[in-house]
Image: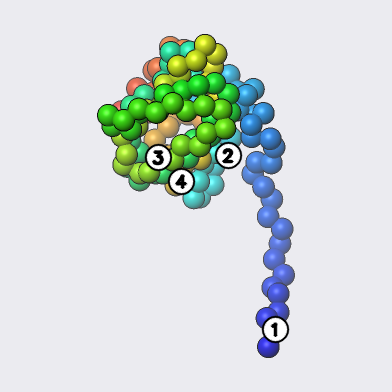
Amino acid sequence: MARKARHTESTVLSFHDNIKEAAKKNLAFRQTVCKGGFSELVVISVPPAGELGQGAHDDTDVIMFIVEGKGEVTFGDRKEIANKHDAILVTAGRLHNLRNIGRHDLKLFAVFSPPSSGASAIVHKAGAEAAEEQLRYAWEQ
């Protein structure tokens, strides 16, 4: 017997745009694009010689996608180069960092699942404001 399809309402997307272009245009250190119950999409811009900051998300997996630039990913004592088009999976609880080793801003987008709830703001500024926000975020973890 064939199953009868159930009629469901169409889902309205919270974000529907070119995420690569959104990451390239992003000037903030970290900006939440959209956040759902089970994941969060953010764009990140790391200035030359800047970094995300070493840390671990206890209950959150993170998938980072490099859009522009060159970075160095650190997992504990292990270091690897990350280039444009690379994807980096960081499992919950894993100590990691991403440092910009290029001459231009490192542009990426990331999916946090479940959403990271420790950030006190949706947009994190660049430079000194970003460093202060990173410290505040790390303290809240």
Q: Position of residue 71 (x, y in %)?
A: 46, 23
Q: Secondary structure at mark 4?
A: strand
Residue under pointer 1: 2
Which residue does the numbered mark 2 point to in the structure image? 34
Q: Which residue is mark 4?
A: 113
> Quarter-wise, where is residue 76 in the image?
top left
Mark 3 surroundings within 10 Å by alpha-carbon count, few (fewer than 14), some (14 through 19), many (20 or more):
some
Q: Give the Cα distance between marks 2 and 1.
A: 38 Å
Mark 3 or 2, closer to the camera = 3
* Crowd tier of the residue under label 1, counting other residues whose Cα lies within 10 Å: few below 14, some 14–19, many 20 or above: few
- Residue drawn at the location 39% of the way across and 17% of the way down: 132
Q: Please say if the residues under marks 2 and 4 sit with CB atoms less than 8 Å apart.
A: no
**Mark 2 closeness class: few <14, some 14–19, many ≥20 residues within 10 Å:** some
User: Gap in Å between the C-alphas at discs 3 and 2?
Assistant: 20 Å
In the rendered image, the quadrant that contains the C terminus is top left
Residue type, label 3: Val
What is the number of the mark on residue 90?
3
